[in-house]
């Protein structure tokens, strides 16, 4: 099996305010979805959420605000899963809760160096 990176992206500027109960329910959806992947023994690293703030280091040591300040979509987090093919990894990604909230999942094979 190969490892695949799931990169979660979402436009946080259009998200409505959520109550603590809604946040808890959303967290449960994420844990349930990740749990189904783990139950198939296909979870390499559950990953983490990423803070919205960051900096980008460019050539010549130029530091800019970022990342991706020119687009609305922000990197929200990541996970690493095991699958036999990109198509199988995409099937695992189809249940991701971020899709129901208008976000997306980028699926990339990890090439071992």
Image (tube, rainbow, N blue to C red):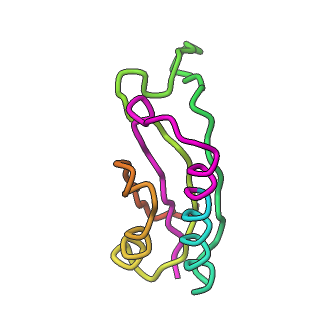
95 shown above or below 76: below
User: Against 30, is 38 above or below?
Assistant: below
Numbered circles on residues, count? 0
Q: Residue 60: x percent and y percent?
A: 55, 14
**Which quadrant of the figure has residue 90?**
bottom left
Residue 52 % position (x, y): 57, 31
**Relative to residue 91, is residue 110 drawn left or right?**
right
- Which image quarter holds the C terminus? bottom right
Q: Residue at x 44, y 74 (%)?
A: 92
Quick one: 103 or 105, which is closer to the camera? 103
- Tell whether position 25 is magenta: yes
6 to the left or right of 38: left
Which of the 4 quarters of the picture holds residue 32? bottom right
The image quarter in which residue 109 lies: bottom left
Q: Residue at x 42, y 70 (%)?
A: 95
Q: Residue at coordinates 61% horizontally, 41% vertically from top-left?
A: 50
Q: Residue at x 43, y 36 (%)?
A: 15
Note whether 10 is above or below 24 in the view shown: above
**Magenta span covers which residues?**
1-26
Instruction: Look at the picture and state if 12 lies above or below 93.
Output: above
The answer to if 99 sits in the magenta stretch is no
Across and down, in percent, residue 97 comes to 46, 60
Task: Pinpoint residue 38: horizontal percent, then vertical percent.
Answer: 62, 79
Looking at the image, which residue sits at the far bottom? 40
């Amino acid at each position: 099996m190969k490892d695949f990176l799931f990169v979660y992206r979402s436009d946080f500027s259009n998200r409505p305010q959520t109550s603590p109960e809604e946040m808890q329910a959303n967290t449960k959806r994420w844990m349930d979805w990740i749990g189904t992947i783990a139950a198939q023994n296909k979870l390499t690293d559950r990953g983490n959420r990423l803070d919205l703030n960051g900096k980008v280091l460019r050539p010549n040591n130029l530091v800019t605000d970022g990342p991706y300040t020119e687009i609305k979509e922000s990197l929200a987090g990541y996970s690493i899963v095991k699958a036999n093919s990109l198509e199988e990894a995409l099937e695992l990604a189809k249940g991701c809760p971020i899709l129901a909230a208008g976000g997306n999942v980028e699926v990339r094979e990890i090439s071992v160096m």
